[in-house]
């Protein structure tokens, strides 16, 4: 692996982790189109870079939740939503073959675009997160679990689901990003355990550069989504998804 490759993969992971375009789908496409093989340990390190990015970007909300766990409903909502997420993710990992995951790629990109368009055109975002019902929280957790399929964006699907339940875009995006923290932690832990039995092939300086690239691009992507939600430019992510959808059909 070269430094340029590590920068490219770090930027790709960081931007697509939080933009509603699917990080797993883009990484699959990059590996197929450019014959890139980063290695499991490198992937874990990139996840940690994006984890640090979202924790810093959401530090005020995260601190408020930690300081007042009973007064603030967010911690309870995060816990409840995470249960179906982990249950579905575990079932998919145990019973869905890798080949099926790859062939689901175009469908994932298409479904993400549809959800973004529907949430933009049909939603009436008037509620705060604290006013959300349990149904919306559970459905968001289920949606995030299904988003383990590549091409189906975790942030795109969860934000869209909450908007369709009437939750305003800013609160939906904030909750989606907070909900990503346990998911990224669990993913890094699972991959880290597997990586213990695999030789590290990437040079240490490439790993460091990749982490920095993932961290910085992750920060930028969080703020890009928050701005897009507020400036009514959410729909443009659906337009962009035409590109990876087309590419995924070509490389199948």
Image: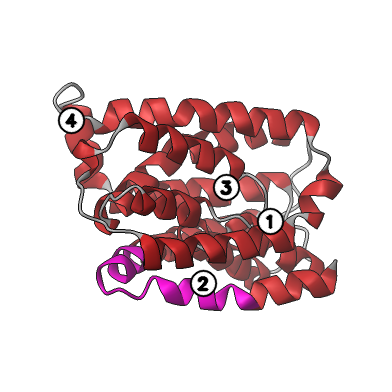
The residue depicted at 46 percent of the width and 30 percent of the height is: 82
The residues tagged by marks 1 and 2 sit, at their Cα atoms, a distance apart of 37 Å
- Give residue 238's mark: 2
Task: Kindly report which numbered mark, 1 or 4, lies closer to the viewer in this rendering.
Answer: 4
Task: Kindly report which numbered mark, 4 or 3, lies closer to the viewer in this rendering.
Answer: 4
The picture quadrant where one finds residue 86 is: top right
Q: Nearer the viewer, residue 225 or 104?
A: 104
The residues tagged by marks 3 and 2 sit, at their Cα atoms, a distance apart of 29 Å
Residue 53 appears in view: no
Residue 19, image x, y percentages = 46, 63
Residue 91 appears in view: yes
197 to the left or right of 59: right
Q: Nearer the viewer, residue 109 or 98?
A: 109
The residue depicted at 53 percent of the width and 78 percent of the height is: 239
The first of marks 1 and 3 along the sequence is 3
The residue depicted at 72 percent of the width and 68 percent of the height is: 30
145 to the left or right of 135: right
What stretch of residues is rendered in magenta? 223-242
Label 3 SS: helix
Residue 99, image x, y percentages = 86, 48
Q: Nearer the viewer, residue 191 or 28?
A: 28
Picture layout, residue 245 above or below residue 205: below
The picture quadrant where one finds residue 133 is: top left
Residue located beneath label 4 in the image: 72
Picture layout, residue 62 above or below residue 248: above
Q: Are marks 4 and 3 in contact (CB under 8 Å)?
A: no
């Amino acid at each position: 692996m070269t430094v340029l490759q590590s920068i490219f993969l770090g930027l790709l992971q960081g931007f697509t982790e939080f933009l509603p375009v699917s990080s797993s789908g883009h990484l699959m496409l990059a590996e197929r189109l450019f014959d890139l093989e980063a290695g499991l340990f490198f992937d874990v390190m990139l996840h940690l870079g994006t984890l640090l990015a979202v924790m810093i970007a959401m530090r005020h909300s995260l601190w408020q939740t930690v300081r007042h766990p009973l007064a603030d409903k967010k911690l309870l909502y995060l816990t409840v939503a995470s249960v179906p997420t982990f249950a579905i993710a575990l079932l998919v990992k145990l019973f869905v073959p890798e080949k099926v995951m790859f062939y689901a790629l175009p469908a994932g990109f298409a479904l993400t675009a549809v959800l973004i368009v529907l949430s933009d055109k049909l939603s009436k975002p008037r509620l705060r997160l604290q006013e959300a019902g349990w149904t919306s929280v559970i459905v968001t957790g289920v949606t995030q679990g299904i988003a383990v399929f590549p091409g189906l964006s975790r942030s795109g699907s969860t934000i869209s689901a909450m908007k369709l339940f009437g939750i305003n875009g800013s609160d939906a995006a904030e909750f989606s990003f907070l909900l990503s923290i346990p998911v990224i932690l669990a993913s890094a832990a699972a991959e880290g355990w597997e990586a213990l039995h695999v030789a590290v092939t990437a040079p240490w300086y490439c790993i460091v550069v990749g982490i920095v690239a993932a961290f910085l691009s992750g920060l930028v992507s969080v703020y890009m989504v928050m701005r897009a939600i507020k400036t009514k430019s959410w729909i443009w992510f659906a337009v962009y998804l035409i590109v990876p959808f087309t590419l995924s059909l070509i490389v199948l």
